[in-house]
Image (cartoon, rainbow, N blue to C red):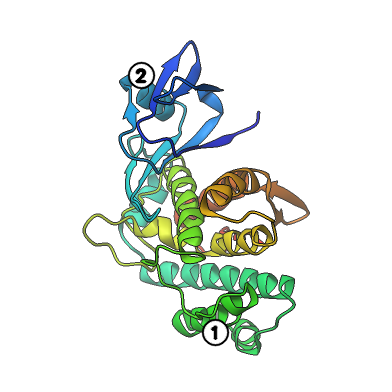
Amino acid sequence: MSFHVLHVFQHGATLAKEQGFVVCRSQSGEERRLPHEDIRAVIIAARGVTLTSRFVSAILESEGIILHCDESYQPCGITSALSRVIDRNAFLRQASQPLRLNARLWQQMLRGKTENQIVVLRHLELTCPYLEVALRTGKIDEGNAARRYWQLYFPALGFPDTGRDRKEIASPNQMLNYGYAVLVALCHRSLLIHGLLPTLGVQHTTRYRSTPLVFDTMEPFRPVVDLLLAHFLKQPVHDMKAWTKYIGTALREHRMEHKRYSLKLMDAIDASASSLARAYSENSATPFWTPKL
């Protein structure tokens, strides 16, 4: 089965379910169809989109998720299936917020992210001694690591700024926002189907309208978007519309290393979420797996 992420950019479009298919109709009458069981996430980045009740229930029943974005392509809301308990031990242990286990899990997440950031920089023919030393010693300061990384990454893409600004509505930050938004949806979905509570984070703090575990678990996957953006900007046309089409296909087809074989990104996210559930169930960080570029 080929899984898809459906991106909706047509203002005033209507999404419905008809005879096993999701149907997207534009205001001009143009129509596109996909089997609803093949859709893992729907990303809505347009105004005035109509969602029929049959469409919403079909996506949720097939374990999909709907992500709503604002005008800067930042996630502002999620429509998801109800939380579930798959493993009682994992549920109770996660709910108890074990400090020692969470600290170890967070270090593994940071390590996975740092390893993948180093791979991205190598693709750009760059090295970052700070990240390499942090990885070797195991003492990773997330804030300083991010600052050093962006100071190298953005100039390598031809942009003068050296800081990541999530509120910036111009390239490349807007493009990163959108790519990360897709990761948010996929990670949120995987956590739910493996019985984890997105509102209880490993490191990020629980606060009003937040899903900290989603942002914890997606950390090792963020460099995938960074790498894909670097490849995309070499294309002859690299505006926002072209990027959204590119990232939809690239994230579906991109593969990540998993022990002796590779997994497609969507399956790697599922595998990581499943291993996190096992870690809570066994009260050990050993089962937890982070992907490698």
Q: Amino acid at mark 2?
A: Arg
Q: Residue furthest left?
A: 208
Mark 1 — residue?
148
Which of the marked residues, 1 or 2, is nearer the chain's N terminus? Answer: 2
Crowding near the residue tagged with mark 2, few <14, some 14–19, many ≥20 C-alpha atoms within 10 Å = few
Between 256 and 55, the residue placed more toward the observer is 55
SS for dot 1: helix
Q: Is residue 21 above or below residue 2?
A: above
Crowding near the residue tagged with mark 1, few <14, some 14–19, many ≥20 C-alpha atoms within 10 Å = some
Mark pair 1, 2: CA separation: 48 Å
SS for dot 2: helix
Between 104 and 35, the residue placed more toward the observer is 35
Residue 279 seen in render: no
Tell me where residue 227 appears, x and y as whole percent.
64, 63
At a point 60% along the width and 81% down the height, the residue shown is 152
Tell me where residue 229 appears, x and y as whole percent.
61, 61
Mark 2 — residue?
54
Between 65 and 5, the residue placed more toward the observer is 5
Quarter placement of the N terminus: top right
**Contact between labelled residues 2 and 1, with CB atoms less than 8 Å apart:** no
The picture quadrant where one finds residue 248 is top right
The picture quadrant where one finds residue 49 is top left
Between 176 and 78, the residue placed more toward the observer is 176
Residue 260 seen in render: yes
Q: Amino acid at mark 1?
A: Arg
Tell me where residue 226 appears, x and y as whole percent.
59, 64
Tell me where residue 46 appears, x and y as whole percent.
38, 41
